[in-house]
Amino acid sequence: ASSGSSSGGVSLANDANNRVVTADGSGGINGEANLTFDGTDLTIASSGKAIFGDANSYIFQSSENFYIRGHNDMYFNIDTPNDSTARHFIWRANTSNELMRLGEDKRLELQGDLYLDSDGAVIHFGDDANTSFTHINNTGFRINLSRQLQFGDSGTYIHQSADGVLDLVSMLK
């Protein structure tokens, strides 16, 4: 068959290499200029979207930004190229206000409040989690073991030196 027609009488409009072919609704077929498949990669050109289920759940790229929109929980496992540029996951509200940023440097930045919505929630610190800060329901917080709460420098701190003994230490100069 030659470009633009076939032996069965169906006309192929907009023919070009690797274009995905769709029906045009009137018995003809069309090679989609913005949708191509080369046997390995499916490419949506321009500002096209991959829509899942309904028009409110989609993936698309615009300029240097990659967008995922969905109705419910979304799970991410995204790998970015390994080069000298620091990579971040950036969460935004309605594509404008940045809410949170998580970098490959393991730094988490929040634009607002952090809620640990669990009685007994624990924040662990250090590679081996040897220091923790635990929420005690309806009471307050606990620092584990013989750790200190320091103020200003290492010479001014509060700590529990023995069971039931609280020390306030301040080194005078």
Image (tube, grey):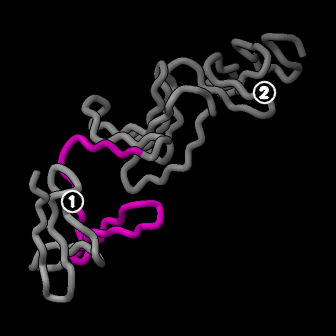
Judged from the image, the secondary structure of the residue bearing numbered disc 1 is loop
Sequence order check, earlier mark of 1 and 2:
2
Q: Position of residue 94 (x, y in %)?
A: 28, 35
The N terminus - image quarter: top right
Q: Position of residue 77 (x, y in %)?
A: 55, 49
Q: Residue at x 31, y 37 (%)?
A: 92
Residue at the extreme front of the image, as rendered: 173
As for residue 117 lying within the magenta part, the answer is yes
Q: Residue at x 21, y 85 (%)?
A: 162
Tell me the kind of residue under disc 2.
Asp
Front one among 5 and 60: 60
Q: CA distance from mark 1 to mark 2?
A: 47 Å
Front one among 21 and 97: 97
Disc assigned to residue 163 = none
Task: Indicate the quadrant where residue 5 lies.
Answer: top right
Q: Residues within 10 Å of mark 1 (few under 14, many from 20)?
A: few
Q: Is residue 62 visible?
A: yes
Residue highlighted by disc 1? 115
Residue highlighted by disc 2? 38
Q: Is residue 25 visible?
A: no
Task: Indicate the quadrant where residue 149 lies.
Answer: bottom left
Q: Residues within 10 Å of mark 2 (few under 14, many from 20)?
A: few
173 relative to 77 in the view: left or right: left
Judged from the image, the secondary structure of the residue bearing numbered disc 2 is loop
52 above or below 11? below
39 above or below 33? below
What residue range appears in magenta? 107-134
